[in-house]
Amino acid sequence: MADTSTESTGTAEALSLVPKAEGKQSMKDFKSDQEVRWCPGCGDYAILAAVQGFMPELGLARENIVFVSGIGCSSRFPYYMNTYGMHSIHGRAPAIATGLAASRRDLSVWVVTGDGDALSIGGNHLIHALRRNVNLKILLFNNRIYGLTKGQYSPTSEVGKITKSTPMGSLDAPFNPVSLAIGAEASFVARTVDSDRKHLTEVLRQAAAHPGTALVEIYQNCNIFNDGAFDALKDKQQAEEAVIRLEHGQPVRFGSGLSKGVVRDQRTGDLKVVTVTPDNEAQVLVHDARTESPTTAFALSRLADPDTLHHTPIGVFRSVDRPVYDTLMADQLDTAVEQHGKGDLSALLAGGDTWTVVG
């Protein structure tokens, strides 16, 4: 089982300023009156159901929960949540959510985005939200395709991907969203799968408890334009050998009878998968999501083969304490008021840093 010993403290810190709900809530309370419109069989349905089912656990007033999305299939999400929400601008959801979270610390702010929205036009907004550690929860739906615009390759599509915009195969090396987030100094990074309701809910639970930015990559099937992209992780037989489930404090083992394990190559320092034997069992890596250095978390994110998804880790890669941007900003403003009093906007506009333009 995952180590959840610090979750209650984290939840208290992350959500302490958000008003609590009056009375007990249920999944039904978080369903809006809007008809859900995605393609039949889309993985978004499973994610929506998981989020709606999880939200009552937070015990927060719905009017103090906000979902902000960009543009894409996933970005219809706010319509279906009976909370406040905003279907915003392509790639700019993290920027809008940053302003909201920083100015209204009494809100629980969630961003819903896709691999195209977040990693193409929105790439800079995403990495800056991560490095600042704003108190946001970012759900990145990754189906490795542009679904809304009918099947062009995306920033996570594999090399050689044949699509309407790459009829001879994509030449672009794909982003690894988890590697990108860890490289941007994100304090919480996780990966899960749309069809694994139990795992998805547990990852959401840990993300909500984390003070600061939490990025959750969710592998999501687009059954119209990229069907079966993640079958290797969903088929029971294949998944046993392909999926590496990360649990803090536990050895990184997987496969039939936990016969495989992840060890550090003594020569290169890289991580590699081995068959566990009595001779190497003591060398199997014990997962530590809370270590200060991101080195091992990054190495774990590089294990998966981008084409076959063989040896794909899921779970929480990194969960560390860092100063939260919203708190730092509020403290700085309080200090400024104590030292200088409340600001005068008129005086600022008419201050000495002005000039006259002579025609």
Image (cartoon, rainbow, N blue to C red):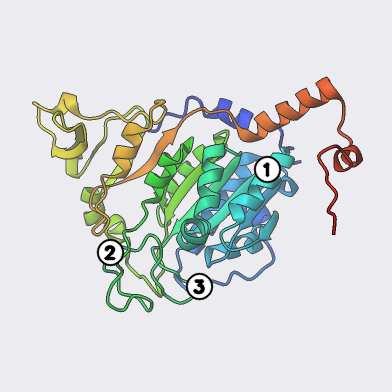
Q: In the rendering, which numbered label is found on residue 101?
A: 1
| Residue drawn 46% across the image and 42% down it | 203
The answer to which of 100 and 199 lies nearer the viewer is 100
Look at discs 3 and 2 and give the one toward the viewer. Answer: 2
> Residue 112 vs residue 254: left or right?
right
Mark 2 surroundings within 10 Å by alpha-carbon count, few (fewer than 14), some (14 through 19), many (20 or more): some
Please determine whether, in this image, residue 106 is positioned above or below residue 27.
Answer: above
Identify the amino acid type marked 1: Ala
Q: Quadrant of residue 154?
A: bottom left
The answer to which of 130 and 201 lies nearer the viewer is 130
Q: Quadrant of residue 159?
A: bottom left
> Residue 172 vs residue 133: left or right?
left
Q: In the rendering, which numbered label is found on residue 159?
A: 2
Identify the amino acid type marked 3: Leu
Q: CA distance from mark 2 to mark 1?
A: 37 Å
Q: CA distance from mark 3 to mark 2?
A: 21 Å
Q: Earlier in the sequence, mark 2 or mark 1?
A: 1
Q: Are marks 2 and 1 in contact (CB under 8 Å)?
A: no
Q: Position of residue 144 (x, y in %)?
A: 38, 63
| Residue drawn 28% across the image and 28% down it | 286
Q: Position of residue 13 (x, y in %)?
A: 62, 28
Task: Specify the quadrant that holds the N terminus.
Answer: top left
Label 2 secondary element: loop
> Residue 259 vs residue 111: left or right?
left
Q: Position of residue 305 (x, y in %)?
A: 24, 53
Residue of label 3: 148
> Residue 142 vs residue 212: left or right?
left
